[in-house]
Image (spheres, rainbow, N blue to C red):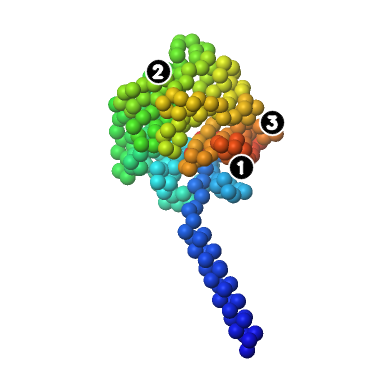
């Protein structure tokens, strides 16, 4: 009898422990995955698919299929419930929307194929801004993801022939962008600006004799991270820099031996997703870089003819 009572007691304790663990797992937030485009060559030809990986996991998952359709440019919606991307599933390159697991995929735009250099969600989560080539010029447009209606963003005051790359603050009020100081010179120095979306309060954050690339806002919009090779015009020794949005505390985050060429900030602001070159993996390596400690964790490694690009986190 005593054995039965003891066994029953242990069973109750074990059951409660299992339920407690399950409850903690259910209550804990799911990992926000890093999205990227995986370009590769198969026996069918050149392909590209949207791929996702959680920094806590050991393997990536393929979100889209049929890579021959040229799936590319993944972007998380502001609330993380949708992924916008480009695909030629209809025969021409168009904007698509899908759930994080790849389900509920549907085409948003129609007409002639899109030639897009940049794609980003606007803070309202209802529209996507695209920089589209039209009649020989690059124009910004906003696409309503529900109705498909396209409106012009000509009011965006930073459009310029010397404009190179940009990013929008999370509150939608400011932009960070890179221009050449002297656009007519091939080796012109670059400048990194921030300003209001209406062109107000322009401020030069960084001014180097080399190239500046990939400016991105921290989740709280208090800092800008960017890539620069300083005075090295070939950019063979890129490094990551961070600066406060008031122009203070410019500092180099990595040494030049890292050779990064694309970055994205983590949702919690503690780390950066970094695509960097590696002599052992010539197709690129995706790292999780801890900002405070500088620790690098390799998440995804590729060799040619494969390549990874176009980060969203």
Residue 143, placed above or below residue 257: below
Residue 227, placed above or below residue 103: above
State the mark number for residue 299: 1
Q: Percent x, y for residue 19?
A: 52, 68
Q: Residue at x 59, y 17 (%)?
A: 232
Toward the viewer: 287 or 241? 241
Judged from the image, the secondary structure of the residue bearing numbered disc 3 is loop
- Circles 3 and 2 in contact, beta carbons < 8 Å: no
What's the CA distance linking mark 3 and mark 1? 16 Å
| Residue picked out by circle 2 | 161
What's the CA distance linking mark 1 and mark 2? 37 Å
Regarding residue 113, the answer to whether it shows in the image is no
Badge 2 density bin: few <14, some 14–19, many ≥20, Cα 10 Å = few
**Marks 3 and 2: which is nearer the front?**
3
Q: Quadrant of residue 280?
A: top right
| Residue picked out by circle 3 | 279
Judged from the image, the secondary structure of the residue bearing numbered disc 2 is loop
- Circles 1 and 2 in contact, beta carbons < 8 Å: no
- The quadrant in which the N terminus is found is bottom right
Toward the viewer: 54 or 93? 54
Q: Residue at x 61, y 48 (%)?
A: 59
Q: Percent x, y for residue 11?
A: 59, 77
Q: Earlier in the sequence, mark 3 or mark 2?
A: 2
């Amino acid at each position: 009898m005593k054995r039965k009572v003891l066994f029953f007691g242990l069973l109750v304790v074990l059951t409660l422990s299992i339920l407690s663990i399950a409850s903690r797992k259910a209550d804990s937030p799911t990992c926000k995955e890093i999205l990227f485009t995986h370009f590769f060559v198969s026996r069918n030809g050149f392909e590209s698919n949207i791929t996702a990986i959680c920094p806590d996991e050991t393997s990536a998952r393929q979100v889209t299929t049929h890579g021959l359709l040229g799936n590319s440019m993944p972007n998380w919606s502001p609330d993380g419930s949708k992924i916008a991307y480009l695909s030629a599933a209809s025969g021409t390159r168009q904007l698509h929307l899908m759930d994080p697991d790849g389900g509920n995929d549907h085409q948003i735009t129609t007409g002639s194929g899109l030639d897009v250099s940049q794609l980003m969600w606007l803070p309202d989560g209802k529209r996507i801004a695209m920089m589209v080539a039209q009649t020989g010029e690059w124009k910004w447009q906003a696409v309503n993801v529900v109705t498909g209606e396209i409106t012009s963003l000509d009011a965006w005051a930073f459009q310029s022939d010397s404009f190179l790359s940009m990013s929008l603050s999370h509150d939608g009020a400011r932009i960070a962008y890179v221009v050449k100081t002297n656009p007519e010179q091939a080796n012109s120095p670059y400048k990194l600006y921030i300003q209001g979306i209406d062109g107000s309060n322009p401020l030069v954050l960084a001014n180097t004799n080399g190239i500046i690339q990939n400016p991105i806002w921290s989740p709280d919009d208090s800092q800008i991270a960017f890539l620069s090779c300083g005075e090295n015009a070939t950019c063979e020794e890129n490094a990551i820099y961070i600066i406060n949005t008031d122009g203070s505390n410019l500092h180099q985050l990595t040494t030049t031996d890292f050779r990064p060429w694309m970055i994205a900030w983590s949702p919690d602001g503690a780390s950066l997703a970094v695509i960097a070159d590696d002599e052992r993996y010539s197709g690129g390596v995706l790292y999780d870089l801890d900002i405070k400690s500088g620790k690098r964790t390799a998440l995804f490694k590729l060799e040619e003819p494969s390549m990874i690009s176009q980060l969203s986190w």
